[in-house]
Image (cartoon, helix red, strand yellow):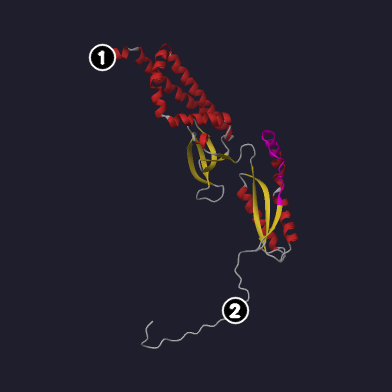
Amino acid sequence: MSDEWKRILAEPLFIRAILVVFGLIVLFLTIRAIQHSITQRVEPPQARYRIRKMIAMGGYLIVALFISIVFSDQLGHLAVAFGVVGAGVAFALQEVIASMGGWVTITLGRYYQVGDRILLDGILGDVIDIGVLRTTLMECGGWVSADLYNGRIVRIANSAALGDLIFNYSADFPYLWDEIILPVKYGGDPRVARAMLERVAHDLLYGNIASARKAWQTSRRLYLLDDEKVDPVITLLANDNWMEFTLRYIVDYRQRRQIKDRLYTRILEEIEQLSGQVTIASATIQLVDPHRFSVHLEKAQEGTRD
């Protein structure tokens, strides 16, 4: 071994660097083992996720403390070095710094949390992870209709939370207002149609009204909101083509498609039992008193041209 290598190996800074590398490897393996061991005993997915995050954050703090202890007498020199390169690093890592700032804003401002359904940067999905740099969504929609998963996982930089609009479907009030429209032909009995819709709404929707009302009152204590009615409401609009009944109702954001399917299925079943008193209208074209006209076709003579 040359004298130069012997001199390098004898340097205290080199020895400390080797110690840090081995220490980081041991800490990483230990943290992974602790995560695996503890989370295997936790059944609820949300609790398991939070425990893994807490262990990871604790690991980061231990790593930072370990490095600061190893280089305790060199911190002054490191501070000078960091100050020199800090401006260049800040310029080169603008997006990274902005994403870290977005993570702080998301965490402290409680813009959203894991499990919420949000629309961020034009992407609709459920939040499955919030990292220091990126938010991970299980995407809904796309080529799949309604609010169903399409299987695509999307990672969005946290910096998007600083400038873009964030639509949260489930934060403080996990319900949405939805409506279905039923066109009924003129000549049908509107009272029968309204009674039918009221009966369907009572059977299928009133089971969640109490919990929805409680959630709305909780939201009123957090925000300046009016005492909105959460019971189903049926309204009638008469236009040029048909009578248009609208059923407005409140529904859990995760069950919007299923509830609409049940409502339409039940409404069609009820209409079949009304023996023609209520008939669904559709756009049709009707000729009223058309004038008679005749068309005479003559065979062209041979030798003539068009």
Stretch of the chain drawn in magenta: 215-233
Q: Is residue 193 magenta?
A: no
Quadrant of the rendered image containing residue 213 = top right
Can you say whether 32 is above or below 279 in the image? above
Query: Residue 251, percent across and down?
Result: 65, 46
Residue 269 location, x and y as percent? 68, 60
Residue annotated with mark 2: 291
Percent position of residue 76, x then y: 42, 13
Q: Nearer the viewer, residue 241 or 108?
A: 241
Local SS, label 1: helix
Q: Which residue is mark 1?
A: 4
- CA distance separating discs 2 and 1: 110 Å
Q: Quadrant of residue 105?
A: top right
Q: Residue at x 32, y 12 (%)?
A: 10
Q: Is residue 10 left or right of residue 264?
A: left
Q: Are marks 2 and 1 in contact (CB under 8 Å)?
A: no
- Give me the disc on residue 201: none
Tell me if residue 69 comes above or below residue 163 in the rendering: above
Image quarter of the C terminus: bottom left
Q: Residues within 10 Å of mark 1 (few under 14, many from 20)?
A: few
Q: Residue at x 38, y 22 (%)?
A: 85
Q: Secondary structure at mark 2?
A: loop
Name the residue type under label 1. Answer: Glu
The disc labelled 2 sits on which kind of residue? His
Assess whether residue 222 is covered by the magenta stretch.
Answer: yes
Q: Can residue 39 be seen in this snapshot? A: no
